[in-house]
Image: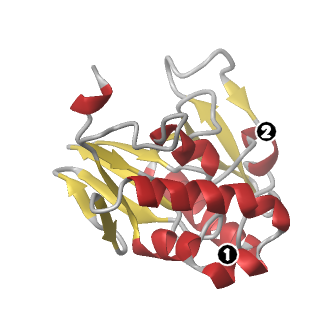
C-alpha cells in the first residue's frame, strides 16, 4: 500500500509519538489524500496558546508536532465530539485525562469487540495493578486515573479484548481482589499472564 492510498486516519490523540509519523521529514502531510479524524477537544487543546503556556516546558515539542500535523492536513481534519461513529461497527470512545480529547477506538463485529485504548496506560506491569499511578505526560492526572479505573471496570465486566500503543500484546483486564490483572489473549504475546 502506498501512502497516497490511505484515505482516513483515526487519531487517539495528538502526542508526537502517535501523530508525528503523519508528517514527512520536511513537515508535509505523509498521506496526501487522507482525512484525519480526532476529537474536537483534542484539536482545540493543542491549538490553544494558553494551554501551551500552562503546560510543562517539556511539552513544547508535543505542541509543535500537533500544530504542524493540524496545519499540514488543513482542510482535511474532521473534528468529532463524544462517542462518534467512525465507520459501521467502529466508534470513538472518549477516554480523557492523558490528553483532554484522548479517545479509544471500539471495533465491534457481532459478539467480537476490540478496544484500542490508546495511552490509557504506559506500563501494564505497573499501571494494571496500580491504576492510580500516572505518568508525567498525563495532561490531567486526576482525570487520567478516573478514566483508567472506569475503563478497567468496563473492560473487566464486559470481557473486552484490548490493544494499545504501549502494550506488547492483545489482552484482557480482569479483576483481582481490589485491583486488576492483565491476561494475554491467545496469540497475543510471549508471556501468558502478568500481574
Element at label 2: helix
Crowd band around label 1 with a 10 angstrom C-alpha radius: few (<14), some (14–19), many (20+): some
Quarter of the image that includes the N terminus = top left
Whichever of labels 2 and 1 marks the residue nearer the N terminus, that label is 2
Q: Is residue 168 above or below residue 27?
A: above
Q: Residue at x 67, y 57 (%)?
A: 62
Q: Residue at x 23, y 41 (%)?
A: 7
Q: Residue at x 64, y 70 (%)?
A: 97
On the picture, is 169 further left or further right than 53? left
Quarter of the image that includes the C terminus = top right
Q: Nearer the viewer, residue 87 or 15?
A: 15
Q: Is residue 28 something that shows in the picture?
A: yes
Q: Is residue 142 above or below residue 66?
A: below
Q: CA distance from mark 2 to mark 1?
A: 21 Å
Q: Is residue 13 something that shows in the picture?
A: no
Disc 2: which residue = 125
Single out the residue that lies furthest toward the left: 88
Q: Nearer the viewer, residue 183 or 61?
A: 61
Disc 1: which residue = 143
Instruction: Give coordinates of residue 110: x percent, y percent.
Output: 20, 43
Q: Residue at x 70, y 75 (%)?
A: 52
Crowd band around label 2 with a 10 angstrom C-alpha radius: few (<14), some (14–19), many (20+): some
Amino acid at each position: 500500500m502506498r501512502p497516497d492510498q490511505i484515505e482516513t486516519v483515526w487519531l487517539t490523540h495528538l502526542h508526537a509519538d502517535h501523530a508525528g509519523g503523519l508528517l514527512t521529514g520536511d513537515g508535509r502531510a505523509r498521506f496526501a489524500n487522507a482525512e484525519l479524524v480526532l476529537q474536537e477537544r483534542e484539536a482545540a487543546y493543542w491549538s490553544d496558546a494558553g494551554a501551551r503556556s500552562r503546560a510543562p516546558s517539556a511539552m513544547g515539542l508535543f505542541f509543535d508536532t500537533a500544530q504542524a500535523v493540524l496545519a499540514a492536513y488543513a482542510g482535511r481534519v474532521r473534528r468529532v465530539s463524544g462517542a462518534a461513529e467512525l465507520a459501521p461497527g467502529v466508534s470513538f470512545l472518549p477516554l480523557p485525562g492523558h490528553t483532554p480529547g484522548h479517545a479509544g477506538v471500539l471495533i465491534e463485529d457481532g459478539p467480537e469487540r476490540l478496544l484500542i485504548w490508546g495511552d490509557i496506560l504506559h506500563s501494564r506491569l505497573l499501571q494494571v495493578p496500580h491504576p492510580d499511578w500516572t505518568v508525567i505526560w498525563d495532561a490531567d492526572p486526576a482525570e487520567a486515573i478516573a478514566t483508567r479505573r472506569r475503563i478497567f471496570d468496563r473492560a473487566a465486566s464486559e470481557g473486552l479484548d484490548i490493544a494499545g500503543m504501549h502494550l506488547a500484546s492483545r489482552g484482557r483486564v480482569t479483576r483481582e481482589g481490589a485491583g486488576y490483572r492483565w491476561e494475554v489473549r491467545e496469540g497475543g504475546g510471549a508471556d501468558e499472564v502478568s500481574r
